Image: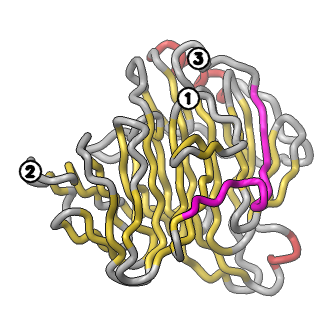
Amino acid sequence: MPDAAMPDDGPVARIIVPREADVGGIPVRRVLPSIELARVGPFIFLDHMGPATLDPGVALDVRPHPHIGLSTLTWLFDGAIMHRDSLGEVQRIEPGEVNWMTAGHGIVHSERTPPDLRGNGSRMHGLQFWVALPDGSEEIAPSFAHHAAHELPAIDSGAIRMILVAGEAFGKRSPVPVHSRLHLVDVQASPGDEIPLPLDHPERAVYVAEGEIEIGRHRIPAGRLAQLRESPVRSLTALTPARLVLIGGDPLASDRIVWWNFCARTRERLESAKQAWEDDRFPQVPGETELIPLPRR
C-alpha cells in the first residue's frame, strides 16, 4: 500500500506507510523520513524496531557510528539496549525510560543487547527518534541524559495510560532536555477510548505501533503514521487495544539535509562531517574497536 493523501475535508492530511529495513539484526519499519513526508515539526526520523524475538546467541549490535546536528531519543516497549558513547557514557535503557543524546557538533555511539540477555535470547520492540537541533544550536557541545520512568509525567485521562515522554503537552512538561518546542506522548488505550490530542503545536502526527484507531472517518491500522492537519479535532478513538505515540512541534526555521546519520543545514557541513568520519577525526567510544563505515552512495 503506498502513502496516501487524504481528502481535504478531514483532520488527516496523509497516511504514511513505512519502508521495511534491518538495523543491527533487528527488523525495522522506517516511518520518517518518507518520500511524501520529510518531518513532523523537528522530528526528522522515526524507526519502529520489532517486535522481534532474538534467539540465544543472537543480539542487537549497532556498531559505533557518528551523528551531527540532531538529538536521538530511544523509547522501548520491550527488551533492553546498552548505550555507549564517545563522552564515556554507558547506560542501559529499559521500557519506560528515556535515553536522550544530543550530537551537536559531533558524537559517536553504539547500541547493543546487554551482556546478560545475549545467552538466553530476548525480545526487542520500540521506537527511535531523531530530532533536528534548531537554527543556531546545531553545533552545540554533545551531551547525554537518561531519565527513569518515574521522572516522566503521567497525563490524567481516565483509564487511558498517557505518558509525556518529551516536550510539553496538556499543561505538563517532561524533564528531557529538548532544544525546541515539541511533544512526544506515549498512549495505551482500550477499545472505545477517546484519546485527547495535544493542540500546542502546528505540525502533528500519530503513529500506531499496535492495534487500530480512528481519526475523523479514517481508520489507521498498526504500522501507519497519520499526518494531521491544523484543524480543531481534539481526539481520536481506539478501535482495538492500541499502543500509539503522538508527536508534533513547531516547524524548523530553515531546511535540513539528512544523509546517513548526519543532519545539516548546508551541503558543505554535511561533506565536512563525511570527510571527518572517513579520516577518523570523530571521537572514539571507549572500549569499542568496531566502526560502521561511511556508506558508498
Please identify the quarter of the rendering in which residue 210 is found: bottom left
Q: Nearer the viewer, mark 2 or mark 3?
A: 2
Q: Which residue lies under the disc numbered 2?
A: 9
Q: Which residue lies under the disc numbered 3?
A: 272
Q: Is residue 145 magenta?
A: yes
Please identify the quarter of the rendering in which residue 136 is found: top right
Q: Which residue lies under the disc numbered 1?
A: 180
Decide which of 220, 255 is in the foreground and name it.
Answer: 220
Amino acid type, label 1: Ser
Q: Is residue 51 left or right of residue 119?
A: left
Decide which of 15, 147 is in the foreground and name it.
Answer: 147
For numbered disc 1, what is the local secondary structure? Answer: loop
Q: Nearer the viewer, mark 1 or mark 2?
A: 2
Amino acid type, label 2: Asp
Per the rendered image, the range of residues in magenta is: 142-156
Q: Is residue 21 magenta?
A: no
Q: Position of residue 138 (x, y in %)?
A: 60, 20
Decide which of 293, 7 is in the foreground and name it.
Answer: 7
Q: Is residue 111 left or right of residue 268?
A: right
Establish if 80 lies above or below 32: below
Please identify the quarter of the rendering in which residue 96 is found: bottom right
